[in-house]
């Protein structure tokens, strides 16, 4: 794959590494941007601790809850432009779809698309109607419903729907009683993007990959191979504190971890609280969107209009 200036620019924005370092990494990985990120991390050149993905697609994320907050849902609906994502009709449509997710037990996408949607027929029919009326392609990309016994759900929407978070707290307290704590934790998830709730939930394949990257970083720094077994456990422990929600430093008070903050608030309330679930959606994460030449697009629209008038 050819290493273009645009690809170099994208890698630089993702990692914060120098332009030439990015170009070398892309050449080394034959233009594979994900592998290039790993190469830069191994060389200690990536300033980004985490990679959210190639975020380019537009749209909205929305969350919804049952009245007692014992059921929760999150959905992402994509559009081609941010202009449409701000369209009141599109926003209302996404709100309604989030509520639809609550209605059905563990719906698959195919089942969801066949659910009734007012007098428009099915969800699929309603989507087709919106595409026709608004004049832009749209896609119901993903959704998730949470409903665990003994868990109360809270959430947070950031930047008008660019990020949506659900947090599940195991407690006997009501949604109103945990509202502040829940929102604080959800905002933590939105801003710090943890991968796991706690250490015992860490994906072992991911951990093995991170361990190999850490080893390579140490070797590139000149550390002797025989010393790695002594150094690696500490490095991995530090990584886990960054990616596990309950072990992260609380953004509103860095003197305590998220788990300590929740424990303090539970003590004040007089009811136990434990974070057991989280979901974080960010619009377009993992989707590569084609770069459009705006001038060419305008010219094409003018040509189409002229042909229609002739």
Image (cartoon, rainbow, N blue to C red):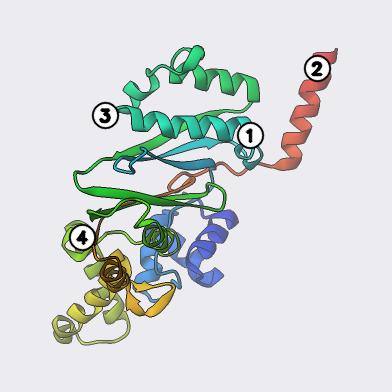
Q: Earlier in the sequence, mark 2 or mark 4?
A: 4
Kindly identify the residue that appears in the image at 20 percent across and 57 percent down: 203
Front label number (2 vs 1): 1
Within 10 Å of the Cα at label 2, are there few (<14), some (14-19), or many (20+) other Cα atoms?
few
Front label number (2 vs 4): 4
Q: Earlier in the sequence, mark 3 or mark 2?
A: 3
SS at badge 3:
loop
Residue 35 lies, in percent from the top left, at 37, 58
SS at badge 4:
loop
Q: Earlier in the sequence, mark 3 or mark 1?
A: 1
Residue 11 lies, in percent from the top left, at 50, 61
Residue 97 lies, in percent from the top left, at 45, 30
Residue 308 lies, in percent from the top left, at 80, 15
Kindly identify the residue that appears in the image at 40 percent across and 69 percent down: 49
Establish if 286 lies above or below 233. Answer: above
Query: Which label sits on residue 296?
Result: none
Q: Which residue is mark 3?
A: 105
Compute the Cα span from label 3 to label 2: 50 Å
Compute the Cα span from label 1 to label 4: 40 Å
**Relative depth, front residue between 258 and 263:** 263
Q: Earlier in the sequence, mark 1 or mark 4?
A: 1
Q: Which residue is mark 2?
A: 307
Can residue 30 be seen by looking at this rendering? no
Identify the image quadrant of residue 220. bottom left
Within 10 Å of the Cα at label 3, are there few (<14), some (14-19), or many (20+) other Cα atoms?
few
Q: Which residue is mark 1?
A: 88
Q: Is residue 298 left or right of residue 258?
A: right
Establish if 303 lies above or below 267. Answer: above
**Relative depth, front residue between 141 and 299:** 141
SS at badge 1:
helix
Q: Earlier in the sequence, mark 3 or mark 4?
A: 3
Q: Which residue is mark 4?
A: 202
């Amino acid at each position: 794959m050819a290493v273009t200036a645009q690809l170099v620019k994208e890698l630089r924005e993702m990692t914060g590494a120098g332009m030439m370092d990015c170009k070398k990494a892309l050449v080394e990985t034959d233009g594979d941007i994900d592998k290039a990120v790993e190469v830069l991390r191994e060389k200690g050149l990536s300033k980004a601790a985490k990679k959210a993905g190639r975020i380019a697609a537009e749209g909205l994320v929305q969350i919804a809850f049952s009245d007692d907050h014992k059921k929760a849902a999150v959905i992402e609906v994509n559009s081609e432009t941010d202009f449409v994502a701000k369209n009141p009709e599109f926003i209302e449509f996404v709100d309604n779809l989030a509520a639809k997710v609550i209605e059905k037990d563990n719906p698959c996408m195919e089942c969801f698309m066949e659910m009734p949607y007012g007098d428009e027929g099915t969800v699929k029919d309603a989507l087709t109607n919106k595409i026709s009326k608004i004049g832009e392609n749209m896609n119901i990309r993903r959704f998730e419903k949470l409903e665990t016994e003994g868990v109360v759900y809270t959430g947070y929407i950031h930047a008008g729907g660019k990020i949506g978070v659900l947090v599940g707290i195991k407690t006997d307290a009501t949604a109103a009683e945990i509202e502040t704590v829940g929102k604080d934790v959800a905002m933590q998830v939105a801003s710090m993007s943890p991968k796991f709730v706690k250490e015992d939930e860490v994906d072992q394949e991911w951990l093995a990959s991170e361990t190999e990257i850490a080893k390579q970083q140490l070797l590139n720094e000149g550390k002797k191979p025989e010393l790695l077994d002594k150094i690696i456990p500490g490095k991995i422990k530090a990584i886990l504190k960054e990616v596990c929600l309950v072990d992260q430093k609380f953004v509103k008070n860095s003197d305590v971890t998220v788990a300590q903050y929740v424990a303090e608030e539970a003590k004040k309330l007089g009811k136990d609280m434990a974070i057991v679930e989280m979901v974080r959606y960010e619009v377009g994460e993992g989707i590569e969107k084609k770069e459009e030449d705006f001038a060419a697009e305008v010219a094409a629209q003018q040509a189409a209009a002229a042909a229609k008038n002739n």
